[in-house]
Image: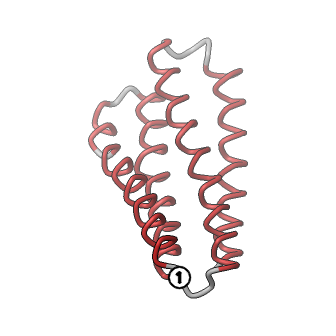
Amino acid sequence: MPKTFLLLGAINTLICIALGAFGAHGLKNIMTDDMLTTFHTGLQYHLYHALGLMIIGLLLIHFTKSRLIELSGWLMLLGIILFSVNVYLLSLTEIRAFAVITPFGGFSFITAWVILVIALWKEK
């Protein structure tokens, strides 16, 4: 499982870098400042949690049997999908319906970190 999270983290970091370049060069002339700020918020949280996925992978090398650390990683990935992807869609389309799902992604992010704290607290 460590390799899975390391790979997911690396792929998501690659996606962030590509989207960041696309946003900086391809979108700045066609998006409003508000929507570009929204896009960058999605990128920011995406990158934090892409790196979080790699941290999860490294932790699972040491704590090989921790289901809580693994759960934390899956919740981070879910958060990326529900938060960042929806923020990208909102900023690109300006369809406000995407904003309804976004708080569930934020909740997934928060829950992932809480579970990680609990997992590390309980590990010996």
Give the labeled residue for mark 1: 66
Q: From the viewer's perspective, tell me whether residue 100 is left or right of residue 112.
A: left
Question: Count the marks: how many?
Answer: 1
Residue closest to the eye, 91 or 114: 114
Task: Please rate how many residues cluster around mark 1, counting C-alpha atoms within 10 Å: few if below 14, some from 14 to 19, many from 20.
Answer: some
Question: The N terminus appears in which quarter of the rendering?
Answer: bottom right
Q: Is residue 14 left or right of residue 122?
A: right
Please name the residue shown 56% across and 15% down the image.
30
Q: How is the image coloured?
A: secondary structure
Q: Amino acid at mark 1?
A: Ser
Residue 99, position as x, y percentages in the image: 31, 37
Secondary structure under tag 1 reads loop
* Relative height, residue 100 to residue 94 (above, below): below
Q: Considering the image in quadrants, where does the C terminus appear?
A: bottom right
Left or right, residue 77 beside residue 51: left
Q: Is 43 on the left or on the right of 35, as rendered?
A: right
Residue drawn at x 44%, y 63% is 75
- The residue lying furthest to the front in this view is 124
Residue 78 placement: quadrant: bottom left
| Residue 98 versus residue 10 in the image, above or below | above
Give residue 62's position: percent from left, percent from top.
68, 79
Q: Position of residue 115 (x, y in %)?
A: 42, 66
Nearest the camera: 103 or 87?
Answer: 103
- Relative vertical location of residue 113 with respect to residue 93 in this rendering, above or below: below
Q: Residue at x 37, y 47 (%)?
A: 106
Above/below status of 40 relative to 3: above
Give the residue at x 65% y 63%.
8
Which residue is most to the bottom?
65
